[in-house]
Structure formats: C-alpha cells, structure tokens
Image (cartoon, rainbow, N blue to C red):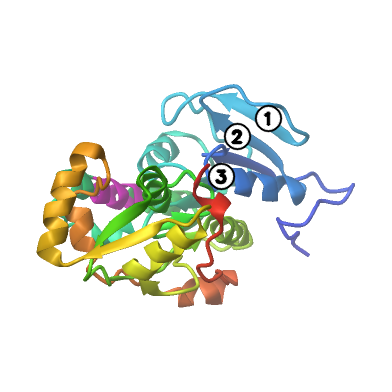
Amino acid sequence: MPIDPLLPASHATPAPRALLFGATGPIGCRVLDGLLRAGWQVEALSRQPQAPRPGLAWRLGTLPEQAGEGGGFDAILSCGPLDLFARWYAQAGTGAARVVAFGSTSVHVKGDSPDPAERALAGRLREGEARLAEVAAARGAAATLLRPPLVYGDGRDRNLSRIAALARRHGGFLLPHDARGLRQPVHVDDLAAAALAALRWNGPGVRAYDLPGGETLSYREMVARVLAALRPPRRLWVLPGPLFALAAWTARGVRLHDAGPAVLARMRQDLVFDAGPARRDLGYAPRGFAPEPGMFGP
C-alpha cells in the first residue's frame, strides 16, 4: 500500500525527502512548516543563513545558478519566482521527483497590458510554465502548477499591504467611483494547503490550477475591508473619474497613491477565476475575505 506523503513515516520506512525553494517567503514558510509537521526531511534554499530546525537542512545560494543539485528527493517545491525555478529545473538532475510550483494568474491577465514591465512578467510566466511542463513530461514526473491571484495574509504582499501602508501614512486611500472590478483575494494559508495537497498526486503529467480565494467582491469593497481592519481604521475616499485622475496625479508627489495607469485600469476589470478544478482534485476550500489588522504589515 503506498504511503501518504503527508503522513509521518513509520520506523520501518524512511521519511520522504523534499527540496523547497522560496522557503522564507510568505507561502514557502507555511509550506515548510507543513512538511516538517508531516514528517518530511526538508532541504531549503535561502540567500541568508537561517536558524536550524529538526528535520531541516539549509542550502545557501540563489536560483538558478547557485541552487545545487536536485537528485535524491521525493518532491521538489517552488514557492518563489517560477521563471528562475524552471531554469534551474531544466538543468538540474531531479529524476522523476514530483514537482509543485507556484506561478500567478498574471499569466492570464497581463499579457496585453499597456505596461511593458507587466507584459514582460506575463511572458516570463508563460515561458516558465512551458519549460517546466516540457521537462517534467520528458522525465516522467508529476508536476502541478498553482496560480494564485491577489495574495494576502502575511504582510509582505505588494498589493493589499501596499494599500494598507499608504492608508496608514496618510489617514486614508483614494479610489475612483467605478473601481468595481471583481476580485478574489486568497490567503497564504490556503495556498500552502493546496501545495501540500498536490503532493498526494502520483500520476505522470502536468496539471495547472487557478487558486482564487473563497469570496468574489468588488475592488472597492475589498479595499474598504482592508481599511476597516486597520487600527485605527482608515478612510476610503471615493472620487468621480476626472477628479480622481487629477487627485491621483497630484498625490504622486507625496506618495498618497502610487498605482500606475495599468493598475488603475484593472480596477475596473473583473478578474475572476474558477476554483472548481482545484476543489475537485485538491480538496481546495479557501476562506472568504475577512481581513484582520496583522495581515497587512505592522
């Protein structure tokens, strides 16, 4: 009978071994905790020296050139930049170790962005996904790609925590009245649970899942809940389109609002993704959006 990779090994069975990238990041630190609780022996890559823990060995280096080899592991997980991981994976000897790697739903929505940096990001994600799928298939390895949208819950994200930081500094946050595009923010704990659940899949091939949060709400309502969760709560200032454009342009000098044109345009767009396949295959059950003060930094 095959051993469930998330259950501690018996005395007669060696503990499964995992190689983890992005272990100090918002998602990776939670994946690391879950692996150790489940009895895995983990090697993890870090740019800086880290404190030792039972069951954990650290590698010092960076992706892709200084990450070391990948042989001898039952699973390889990436919670960092997909393009760098895919480059390492293509050149490292990993055998048929199962792979779980995070990308982003930006691969769906930023390919035709007016912002060159956003288009470049979408291109790197597409290339990373394609390279990972090609190499995994050639090695007969099971590979799972996980694509979250807006991530929150750790205070280190560049979206909602950035908004919270600006609101703390200035007492509130500006939005245009038509910032009603739909969003599905997802908590880091739910993403880590999905990554650990993906380890149970043993069949060859590549699967990809979008991982939206458990609630769909407007951009305006999402920001309002973030501001209400701060201590003390901050105000949401909603302005008509032309007045907002003038205020946002003026405010950049004092960093009251630092969103670029592409971000502002997307506030009006629905960015909604289907959690059905992940729910079916991974038991994915993300929470609704109920922010608390500590989720958005100090």
In contact (CB < 8 Å): disc 1 and disc 2? yes
Q: Is residue 273 among what the camera can see?
A: no
| Mark 1 lies on residue | 57
Left or right side of 219 for 245: left
Within-10-Å neighbours for mark 3: few <14, some 14–19, many 20+ = many
| Mark 2 lies on residue | 44
Residue that lies at the very extreme toward the right in this rendered image: 11
Q: In terms of secondary structure, where does tag 2 sit?
A: strand
x, y percent for residue 208: 43, 63
**Mark-to-mark CA distance, 1 and 2:** 6 Å
Vertical arrangement, residue 134 with respect to residue 211, above or below: above
Q: Residue at x 59, y 39 (%)?
A: 19
Q: Which residues are magenta?
A: 121-130
Q: Is residue 125 magenta?
A: yes
Q: Quadrant of residue 70?
A: top right
Quarter of the figure that contains the N terminus: bottom right
Left or right side of 140 for 57: right
In contact (CB < 8 Å): disc 2 and disc 3? yes
Please tell me which residue lies in front, 9 or 204. 9
Mark 1 or 3, nearer chain start: 3
Dot 1 amino acid type? Ala
Q: Quadrant of residue 32?
A: top right
| Mark 3 lies on residue | 28
Vertical arrangement, residue 24 with respect to residue 267, above or below: above
Dot 2 amino acid type? Ala
Please tell me which residue lies in front, 264 or 125. 264
Vertical arrangement, residue 193 with respect to residue 117, above or below: below
Q: In terms of secondary structure, where does tag 1 sit?
A: strand
- Magenta: main secondary structure equals helix
